Image (spheres, helix red, strand yellow):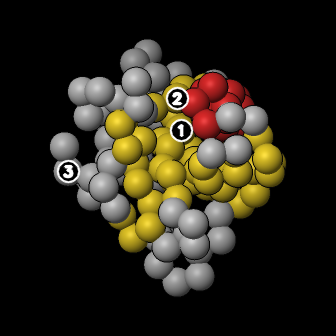
């Protein structure tokens, strides 16, 4: 899988949030993505950020497919993504806040595989 071409890259980002957990800092990008029936829906794509936020690493499953969390609204997709991440990276240490990219977004690094 090419980490430079995430699964949801063809969909525009609706919102972007950064969230801090005990063992990771995550960037959660929410995309407007209709479901198979064409009904409105949203999907969250998850990146882990390095300590200074300059590099982001796409979270993928063991088949190298990007982790995708779905919701009927952007807020439910975000909430489900946060719950998923708490199970893997510990308790929430800092609530979600909007991504603040000054200039270009963080550089894309190697993917992170999660079981």
Marks 3 and 2: in contact by CB < 8 Å? Answer: no
Marks 1 and 2: in contact by CB < 8 Å? Answer: yes
For the residues labelled 2 and 1, the Cα–Cα distance comes to 5 Å
Circle 2 residues within 10 Å: few <14, some 14–19, many ≥20: many
Going 53% across and 38% down the picture, which residue do you hit?
A: 44
Going 69% across and 45% down the picture, which residue do you hit?
A: 21
The residue singled out by tag 3 in the image is: 2
Quadrant of res 51: bottom right
For the residues labelled 2 and 3, the Cα–Cα distance comes to 20 Å
The residue singled out by tag 1 in the image is: 44
Q: Is residue 22 visible?
A: yes
Q: Is residue 108 above or below residue 113?
A: below
Work out whether mark 2 precedes mark 3 in sequence or the reverse, and give the earlier one.
3
Q: Residue 97: give x, y in percent of width and height.
A: 76, 57
Q: Residue 93: give x, y in percent of width and height.
A: 79, 47
Secondary structure at badge 2 equals strand
Q: Is residue 15 visible?
A: no
Work out whether mark 2 precedes mark 1 in sequence or the reverse, and give the earlier one.
1
Quadrant of res 72: top right
- Asked whether, in this view, residue 93 is left or right of residue 35, the answer is right
Toward the viewer: 58 or 78? 58
Going 61% across and 37% down the picture, which residue do you hit?
A: 89
Work out whether mark 3 precedes mark 1 in sequence or the reverse, and give the earlier one.
3
Secondary structure at badge 1 equals strand
Secondary structure at badge 3 equals loop
- Asked whether, in this view, residue 90 is left or right of residue 64, the answer is right
Going 36% across and 64% down the picture, which residue do you hit?
A: 108
Q: Is residue 21 above or below residue 62?
A: below
Toward the viewer: 85 or 7? 85
As drawn, the label of residue 69 is: 2
């Amino acid at each position: 899988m090419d980490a430079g071409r995430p699964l949801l890259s063809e969909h525009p980002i609706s919102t972007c949030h950064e969230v801090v957990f005990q063992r990771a800092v995550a960037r959660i990008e929410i995309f407007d993505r209709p479901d198979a029936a064409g009904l409105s829906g949203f999907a969250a794509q998850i990146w882990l950020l390095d300590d200074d936020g300059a590099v982001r690493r796409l979270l993928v499953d063991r088949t190298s497919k990007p982790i995708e969390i779905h919701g009927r609204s952007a807020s439910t997709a975000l909430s489900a993504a946060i719950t998923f991440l708490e199970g893997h990276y510990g308790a929430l240490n800092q609530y979600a806040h909007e991504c603040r990219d000054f200039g270009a977004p963080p550089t894309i690094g190697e993917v992170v595989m999660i079981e």
